[in-house]
Amino acid sequence: MVATLDTVTLAPPDREEAVRSMVRGSVVRVEIEHHVTPSDLTVALALGQCGDIGVCAARATPATVRRTPRLAREDTEPMVFLSLQRTGSSIVVQHGREAVLTPGDFAVYDTASPYSLLFEDGIDTTFFRIPRAALALPGDAVRDVCAVRIGAGNPLAALTSRYLAGLADDPAILSGGYGPAVVVPTIELIRGALAVQSGDDRISREPLANTLAARIVADMRAHLADPGLSPALVAARHHISVRYLHRILQRENIRFGEWVRHRRLEGARSDLARSSTPVAAVARRRGFADAAHFSKSFRAAYGLSPRQWRATAIATEVYRRRP
């Protein structure tokens, strides 16, 4: 895990905004409604990322989390979240279905559509985030298994649950040198469990490597630092036309330019908060050829200039560390 937040270190009036900022900035853009007073609110988050897999371990007082239609429409790269219940219970709501989860159960939901997560007795859940393109399942297959309890009755459910719990409980696996070795097997195991749940034998047999969209998105991510990254270059590397490239990405609700710009800006925002590297150097490192264009894009996306964002991030970190 590379980022943590524990609200017990914060004054009660600051807790809700600190949680909102971390979740929306590093996990997913959602609305969070806490069901306790500010003085009783407690949230502990631990975040990690390795390749295509993001992990968020959360413990908190009762709350409801909502992905509104507006937030779902703003997505530049749809994600599939897997919610693994550790203790207690929760409810996942999407596409007119409700999945009631108890310890060891899990369910998935898609950020391209609205959803709600209900934690009436508190939160003790580990969330795994995977780009929908990397999961390599057809869109209708993903929709069919969203907000469906995956537990008894699915022969891969128990194995997947134990494996993911072990992965979350050992941060060294993802943050150390072992992470890259487990990313693909982890995605394949999740994909297998979802394919079994769907009951579609064709999906179960289809090799992950045959999914062109997943390879294209991986290529785009690998070349984000190249200022010359373009649809033509990516299409050429995959021996397809630019028109067909856009068609493949459109099926995943991805627009090439928006996706690249968003990913570059998110990387730059993280760099600015964690280092004193000059703004122009951060821009170049993240694939922006022109510093002025970078600053203009950054302000349009986040409402602050890169320097203002850095100053705010530093001030926030200093405040969090106060005894």
Image: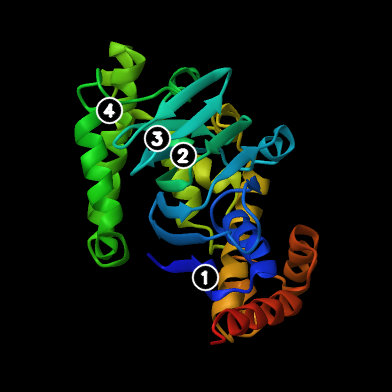
Point out the image quarter for the N terminus: bottom left
In the rendered image, which residue does mark 3 sit on? Answer: 135
- In screen coordinates, is 233 left or right of 150? right
Instruction: Using the rendered view, name the quadrant where residue 19 is placed.
Output: bottom right
Residues marked 4 and 3 touching at CB (< 8 Å): no
Q: Residue at x 57, y 55 (%)?
A: 23
Cα distance in 3D space between marks 2 and 1: 27 Å
Front tag of 2 and 4 = 2
Task: Please report whichever mark, 2 or 3, sits nearer to the chain's N-terminal start.
Answer: 2
Instruction: Using the rendered view, name the quadrant where residue 159 is placed.
Output: top left
| Residue 238 can be seen, yes or no | no
Instruction: Using the rendered view, name the quadrant where residue 46 is placed.
Output: bottom left
Task: Please report whichever mark, 3 or 1, sits nearer to the chain's N-terminal start.
Answer: 1
Cα distance in 3D space between marks 2 and 3: 11 Å
Q: Residue at x 65, y 55 (%)?
A: 261
Residues marked 3 and 1 touching at CB (< 8 Å): no
Cα distance in 3D space between marks 3 and 1: 36 Å
Front tag of 2 and 3 = 2
Q: Residue at x 74, y 65 (%)?
A: 298
Task: Please report whichever mark, 4 or 3, sits nearer to the chain's N-terminal start.
Answer: 3
Q: Secondary structure at mark 2?
A: strand
Cα distance in 3D space between marks 2 and 4: 15 Å
Q: Amino acid at mark 2?
A: Phe
Task: Please report whichever mark, 2 or 4, sits nearer to the chain's N-terminal start.
Answer: 2
Residue 210 vertical placement versus 202 (above, below): below
Q: Residue 8 shows which numbered tag?
A: 1
Q: Amino acid at mark 3?
A: Leu
Q: Amino acid at mark 4?
A: Gly
Residue 161 coordinates in the image, percent (x, y):
26, 38
Residues marked 2 and 4 touching at CB (< 8 Å): no
